[in-house]
Image (cartoon, rainbow, N blue to C red):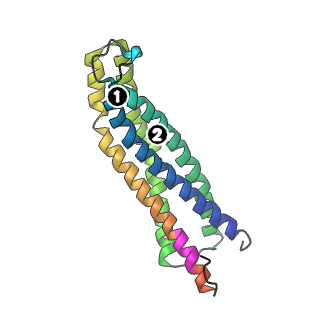
Amino acid sequence: MRAWRPLLETVHIVMMGIWLGGLLAATAVAAIIFPAMKQLEPALPGYAAYTGDHSKLAAGHVGAKLFLAVDLLQLVCAVAGGAALGVLVLGKSLERRAATTVRLVAFALAAALLTFGLAIFTPSMTRPMREYWAAAERGDNEVALAHRAKFAPRHTTAAGLLFATTGCVGLSLTAGAWSLARRRVAIGQEPRP
């Protein structure tokens, strides 16, 4: 098992880094898209009969695709990173120290948040969003606004879920890197700059 440890550690650290990068990038892109669309004041031909704000429709379509891609990225990173970490745990290859505990707990919380998001929260948010889009496309303004009213408050929960997952992934990554650096010092090797 010792021979596989560097590979497994690398897989876990790389997956956590990609996962964290995806979450941070999605947050930044969403923060740019929605205000930019508002400034552009688009008029969408496919929604010509809808009298509501077309910038929210345009930004929502782009944002939905962005977050779908990030959800798939998260799933891949969680499975690959979790498998690597699981093999390390089962092979008793991780030292017992506070950083290891933090790493494991933070990863477990990130995986739980992702599971909740993918299995429960996202479907409950996507349904009224798609109904809003469909009603807006038909020009059924009252129904569109009713569906948007169901969908809009979920943004706060979505943001909280995103920030909590980002924090847990970042913490797991940091604790894993810290643990690796401490291990090198413990066996008498100075970390390379």
**Counting other residues with Cα less than 10 Å from the Cα at mark 1, is it few (<14), some (14-19), or many (20 or more)?**
few
Instruction: Identify residue type, mark 2.
Output: Phe
Which residue corresponds to mark 1? 40
Residue 182, x across and y down, in percent: 55, 80
Residue reaching furthest to the front: 40
Helix, strand or loop for the magenta stretch, by majority: helix
Q: Say left or right for 164 vs 99.
A: left
Residue 181 is a magenta residue: yes
| Front in this rendered view, residue 144 or 117 | 144
- Residue 134 seen: yes
Boundaries of the magenta span: 176-182
Which residue corresponds to mark 2? 67
| Front in this rendered view, residue 191 or 184 | 191
Vertical placement of residue 102 versus 189, above or below: above
Dot 2 or dot 1: first in sequence order is 1
Residue at position x 54%, y 58% in the image: 17
Residue 33, x across and y down, in percent: 39, 37
| Front in this rendered view, residue 119 or 134 | 134
Vertical placement of residue 177 versus 32, above or below: below
